[in-house]
């Protein structure tokens, strides 16, 4: 099973102070990788560093807004000088705004596109030249159910995550010949702070209608846990997936396979 090992590899996971990013980072650390992460505020980076330390992981944390191209270029140069060349990039940092499309301002729409689509382009562009020189690289873009499906209130997010699926295929197309594999992971509905508003207990003590809807829509009949993403991410970061390129691996408990229950 040595082809699944990440021993000696350096992984940058963006926005990994908690949530899905941290669970992926912990999985990669268990497989032997050195973990580097960033987040938007020092406070979040410090919280992340403390959590990694508690888990026995010596992570390197940096403050960096992934939408700022100059800051990202500086970050990558700093990581190369202080830790080494990045072998694995996980574009995890993301935001969502749940606003009906006709009530959403163009500025709000652009903000989501900026973090969820432009930033993965910026960070990938910053790491690819060194990956080419090193002779290998793995890029994992965290996509979504919304790379395939739409729903009310998430127009900008769906546009960005659909675009991220195509950016994934394009990076594969353009850099596959340099032994760079770029794949996506499409998480289903995962219990993290990002989805907490969809799981809030109602004033009458009942479960949020969206919470019930998702359980019914998911053949696994549960929300995903951030840890459900760790194994798939380790696979896509490892030599075991060296001929897997331009693919989006949906980790959704079966949602995309299922037409849904017939109404009672
Ligand atoms: N939770 C889900 O159900 C779910 C499902 C599918 C996809 N995703 C995607 O997975 C990724 C992680 O999701 P999560 O639920 O852990 O989200 P989260 O909101 O809990 O965490 C996202 C992280 O990104 C960071 N971040 C946001 N903007 C940033 C910026 N400009 N620069 C640097 N860091 C920034 C945040 O501070 C946070 O640490 C996101 O891309 C999200 O869209 C989540
Ligand atoms: O409001 C929503 O529908 C959700 O927040 C999402 O879009 C999920 O977080 C996820 O990306 C699904 O894969």
Image (cartoon, grey):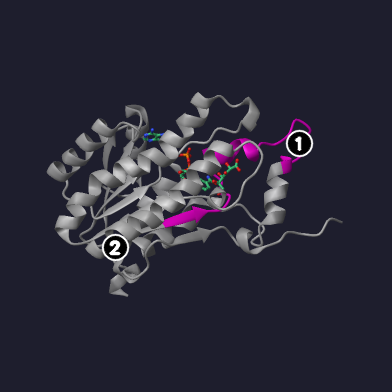
Q: Where residue 42 appears, x then y in whole percent?
A: 32, 28
Q: Nearer the viewer, mark 1 or mark 2?
A: 2
The residue under the point 23% across, 58% down is: 9
Q: Which mark is residue 68?
A: none
- Left-right relation of 167 to 144: left
According to the image, label 1 marks what residue?
205
* Along the line of sight, the residue nearer the viewer: 82 or 160: 160
Q: Residues within 10 Å of mark 2 (few under 14, many from 20)?
A: some
The residue range painted magenta reads 184-209
Q: Residue at x 20, y 55 (%)?
A: 131
Q: Determine whether the residue tagged by mark 1 lies in a helix, strand or loop.
A: loop
The image shows residue 174, relative to residue 54, as above or below, that is: below
Compared to residue 92, the image places residue 113 above or below, namely above
Q: Could one spot residue 79 in this view of the protein?
A: yes
Query: Residue 44 at what x, y percent from top left?
Result: 37, 32
Quarter occupied by the C terminus: bottom right
| Residue 120 sits in quarter | top left
* In-front residue for pair 47/240: 240
Label 2: which secondary element: helix
Does residue 243 appear left or right of residue 165 in this picture? left
Q: Is residue 190 rendered magenta in the image?
A: yes
> Residue 122: x, y in percent?
31, 40
The residue carrying mark 2 is 176
The answer to whether the residue labelled 1 contacts the one labelled 2, judged by CB atoms less than 8 Å apart, is: no
Q: Quadrant of the N terminus?
A: bottom left
């Amino acid at each position: 099973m040595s082809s699944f090992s990440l021993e000696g590899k350096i992984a940058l996971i963006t926005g990994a102070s908690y949530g899905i990013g941290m669970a992926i980072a912990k999985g990669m650390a268990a497989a032997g990788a050195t973990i580097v992460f960033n987040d938007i505020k020092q406070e979040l980076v410090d919280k992340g560093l403390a959590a990694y330390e508690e888990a026995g992981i010596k992570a390197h944390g940096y403050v960096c807004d992934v939408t700022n191209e100059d800051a990202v270029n500086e970050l990558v140069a700093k990581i190369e000088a202080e830790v080494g060349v990045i072998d694995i990039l996980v574009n995890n940092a993301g935001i969502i705004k749940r606003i009906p499309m006709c009530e959403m301002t163009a500025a709000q729409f652009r903000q989501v596109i900026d973090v969820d689509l432009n930033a993965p382009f910026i960070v990938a562009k910053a790491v690819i030249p060194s990956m080419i020189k090193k002779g290998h690289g793995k890029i994992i873009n965290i996509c979504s159910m919304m790379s395939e499906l739409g729903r009310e209130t998430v127009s900008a997010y769906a546009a960005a995550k659909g675009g991220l699926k195509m950016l994934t295929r394009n990076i594969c197309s353009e850099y596959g010949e340099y032994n760079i594999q770029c794949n996506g992971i499409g998480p289903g509905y995962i219990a993290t702070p990002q989805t907490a508003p969809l799981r809030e207990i109602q004033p009458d003590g009942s479960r949020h209608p969206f919470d019930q809807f998702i359980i019914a829509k998911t053949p696994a009949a549960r929300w995903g846990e951030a840890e459900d993403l760790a194994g798939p991410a380790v696979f896509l970061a490892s030599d075991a997936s060296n001929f897997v390129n331009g693919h989006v691996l949906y980790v959704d408990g079966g949602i995309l396979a299922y037409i849904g229950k017939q109404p009672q």
